Amino acid sequence: MLLAFISDVHANLPAMEAVVDRLNNCDEIYCCGDVVGYYPYPDEVVEMFKQLEVKSVMGNHDFAVVTNDFYGFNEMARAAGTWTTKNASEETLDYLAELPLSIVTEDFSIYHGRPGEGMEVLFDYVFPEDDLEQFVVGGNVVVGHSHIQFVRCFRGRFFLNPGSVGQPRDGDPRAAYAILNTENWKLELKRVSYNIDEVCEAVEKAGLPEFLCERLYRGY
């Protein structure tokens, strides 16, 4: 079975479409949260998630958009989140509100941020240089939130961040994702280019902060 892992799409439809075009052979798609936020395609991305039956956890941006609570967000994230709350359909907001904080299977556990049981799963970051071995004691772990793609293996178990589809921050502007083959447990980190110009035009039309466009070209 082929499983796809994505994260932090942030309502970037062109990036999501480019990734989906590469997932034709995948049996299931899992997302580590932040389906929306930053970019102006929340309804379109959520509709794609529904059609593809993507299994997703909730991210901190999803939570903020639903609750209209942007405490701790920087000015640009707050502006984009407020825009999303005002412009997303009720169906989209309902979908986001029903996302779970975690997905636990026999083979792996998925969280947005730090693995756990409380709200830290939404807000706490895990970076590649952190002590990751502590998290895989109970099995394989997949997270998002940092927008940095990486995988570390410990005694036959892995800690994976598939990277961000919609706003990479690891110096590579291409949309990031990962593929796991459960037949041989081969895990591959993937990237794909997409039309950033199209996103920038939509950002400008929506009146969102210009920096949200600029950072896509730099991958940060």
Image: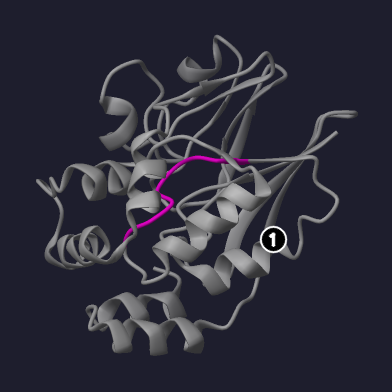
**Quadrant of the image for the N terminus?**
top right
Q: Residues within 10 Å of mark 1 (few under 14, many from 20)?
A: some
Image position of 44 with respect to 122: above or below:
below
Residue 120 coordinates in the image, percent (x, y): 27, 26
Q: Disc 1 marks which amino acid? A: Val
Taking the spot 66% from the left edge, 62% from the top edge, the residue there is 19
Give residue 121's position: percent from left, percent from top.
Answer: 34, 28
If the image is split into quadrants, where does the C terminus sit?
bottom left
Above-or-below relation of 206 to 115: below
Q: Quadrant of residue 115?
A: top left
Residue extending farthest to the front is 90
Tell me if residue 168 can be seen. Answer: no
| Element type at mark 1 | helix
Image spot of residue 32 (x, y percent) = 49, 40
Within the magenta stretch, is there residue 139?
no
Q: Nearer the viewer, residue 150 or 55?
A: 55
Give the x, y percent position of residue 112: 41, 36
Q: How many marks?
A: 1
Coloration mode: one colour
Q: Main secondary structure of the magenta part?
A: loop
Which residue lies at the image location 46% right of the left edge and 42% below the top edge?
144
Circle 1 residue: 20
User: Over which residues does the magenta segment extend?
Assistant: 30-37
